[in-house]
Amino acid sequence: MKKFAIFSALAAALMMAAPAAWSHEAGDWYVRVGYSNTDPDDPNGNIDLGLVDPALPVADINVDDAWSVTITGAYQWKEHWAIELLAAVPFEHDIKVDGLGKVGSTKHLPPTLSLQYHFLPKAKIQPYLGGGVNYTLFFDDEEDGTLKALGGSLSIEDNSWGLAGQIGADWMINDNWMINIDLRYIAIDTKADVTVPLATGGFGTVSEDVDIDPWIYGLSVGYKF
């Protein structure tokens, strides 16, 4: 909620500070480069620690937020409609389990294709809504902390397809340059395999659903061609 309040205040400040208008028009291409925070839902799943010790409970899995550089390319298909593709430098998330602390980490790439509706393409501030589809690719899974000390391992088994929604606005500095703020929600669901030493000896693997479902807060600078 704190991040959402900060993001809303920034949006209001940009609107109050808007200069003269420069429009987006059909046929325009524009690229934005910025910095985004991926803030997953909390908790993201649970795991039965009874595999390690029968006295231990079912514990929540938590995926920490992460920052990275994001890049979007968009084509203004019609005056009010645009098609946008989101790309990024990989996000890296720590994975924690209540009672165990950090157990590992993973990286992901979240390419997202969206169709946007621009409400006021000729206004000082140009707000839009978008919706589309996301494909999240997970890689470089690593065990760490308590899990590593126990001799266990962590693996993210499934990449994710999901729907995505966004709301944002372009603030035109001049005819070519803009500042953009953007808020997205993406449905990202996967499965984690955790291998742990059993209380009775040997090792066992448990597969758990992990619902990441993050809010993504972005601030970027754009250029229109």
Image (cartoon, grey):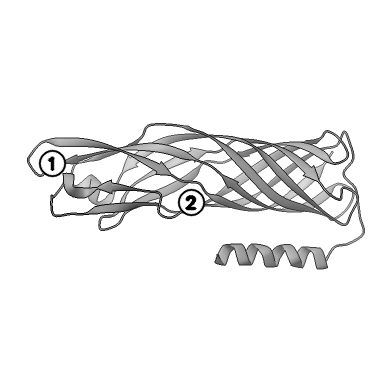
Residue type highlighted by circle 1: Leu
What percent of the width, then of the height, locates residue 105? 37, 45
Mark 1 or mark 2: which comes first in sequence?
A: 2
Graded by Cα atoms within 10 Å as few (under 14), some (14 to 19) or many (20 or more), the crowding at tag 2 reads many
User: At x 19% / y 42%, what residue is drawn?
Assistant: 151
Q: Is 153 drawn above or below residue 101 in the view shown?
A: above
What percent of the width, then of the height, locates residue 135? 55, 33
User: At x 90% / y 47%, what residue is drawn?
Assistant: 23
Residue 65 as seen in the image, left or right of residue 130? left
User: At x 85% / y 37%, what residue is drawn?
Assistant: 28
Nearer-the-camera pick, 54 or 34: 54
Placement of the N terminus among the 4 image quadrants: bottom right
What percent of the width, then of the height, locates residue 224? 83, 42
Placement of the C terminus among the 4 image quadrants: top right
- Asked which secondary structure carries label 1, the reply is loop
Nearer-the-camera pick, 16 or 57: 57
- Which residue is denoted by mark 2 in the rendering? 40
- Which residue is denoted by mark 1 in the rendering? 198
Residue 56 as seen in the image, left or right of residue 101? left
Graded by Cα atoms within 10 Å as few (under 14), some (14 to 19) or many (20 or more), the crowding at tag 1 reads some
Q: Which mark is residue 60?
A: none
